[in-house]
Every structure is written in structure tokens, then in C-alpha cells.
Image (cartoon, rainbow, N blue to C red):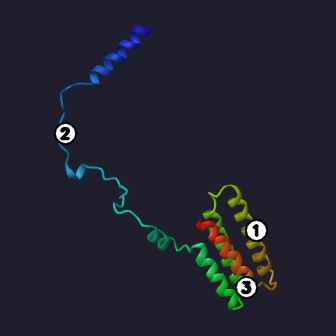
Amino acid sequence: MKHIIICGMLGLALASCNDTTNEVEYDAAEQDYTPTTEVNSQPMEMEDSTALTGDMTYSEHFDAALASLDADHASEAADHMQMGISALMSEGVNMEGTAHQEFKTVVEQLEDANSRLRAGEATDREQLQTLITQAEEMVQR
């Protein structure tokens, strides 16, 4: 029984491998058009992708937070601080060892300062600026 099935499959395989070419003419009206996805042949630069998404860098968020703090807009400053901290953490994800521990400590201090800012407590701008600078320097190493 196995031999019959194998011979049948072999016969089908040989029949489908016919060397004759079948040329079929297609009428343009009969062709089925399917939408295709076009691929941009130009590479997208980093500035372009940032402009498309409207994302700000951690540095820009921190600058906006300090400017909002100077203008006595604490909730807006806290929002920018939170977005800056999130962006900063994604930049520092590849840190290892003591650098990672130091970075983690500074981020925790930034989060504490942000919680105080969100609660409406007085926040020392110079201390906040120092923490931001420390965190940015750690990421840039």
C-alpha cells in the first residue's frame, strides 16, 4: 500500500515539473489589483523621527519643568519632571554595576522631589537643578 501511495505522489510530482512553458496572455482589464505597501527608500534620520512623534528629550522636559517652576506652575512642572524622568530612565537602561546603582539613587531622588512638587510643597530649585545635572551626566558617560 505504501508503494502505491509513494508512486502516486512521485507521478504527481513529475507531472507538475513539465518542461513546457505555458504562456498565458493577460488582459489588463482582467488583472486583479491588490494594494501594496510602499517602502521609503530614504533612511529616516533621528531628528526626523523625533519631529514626527513630537517627543521631547529628557533634557527638554527638565528645562520645561524648571521654567514652569520659575513661573509658579507646580503641576505643569511636575508633569514635565515625570516625563523627563521616564525618558531619562529609558536612556540609562544599559548601565551596569556601580554606575547603575548611582543612577538609580539619583532617579529616586528626582522622583522624591517630583512627589514633593506635585504635593505643592516648597521645592528648592537649585537642589532640583543639581539632581537633574547629575542624572544627565551619568547618562552621557
Residue at mark 1:
108
Mark 3 closeness class: few <14, some 14–19, many ≥20 residues within 10 Å: few
Amino acid marked by disc 3? Arg
User: Helix, strand, or loop for circle 1?
Assistant: helix
Q: Position of residue 47 (x, y in %)?
A: 46, 71
Q: Are marks 1 and 3 in contact (CB under 8 Å)?
A: no
Q: Name the foreground residue: 121 vs 137.
A: 137
Residue 57 visible in this rendered orientation of the protein: yes
Residue beneath the point at 62% across and 83% down: 64
Q: Name the foreground residue: 98 vs 28.
A: 98
Residue beneath the point at 72% across and 91% down: 72
Q: Relative to 125, is 9 on the left or the right?
A: left
Q: Name the foreground residue: 17 vs 52.
A: 52
Residue at mark 3:
125
Mark 1 closeness class: few <14, some 14–19, many ≥20 residues within 10 Å: few
Answer with the quarter of the image where residue 103 lies.
bottom right
Residue at mark 2:
24
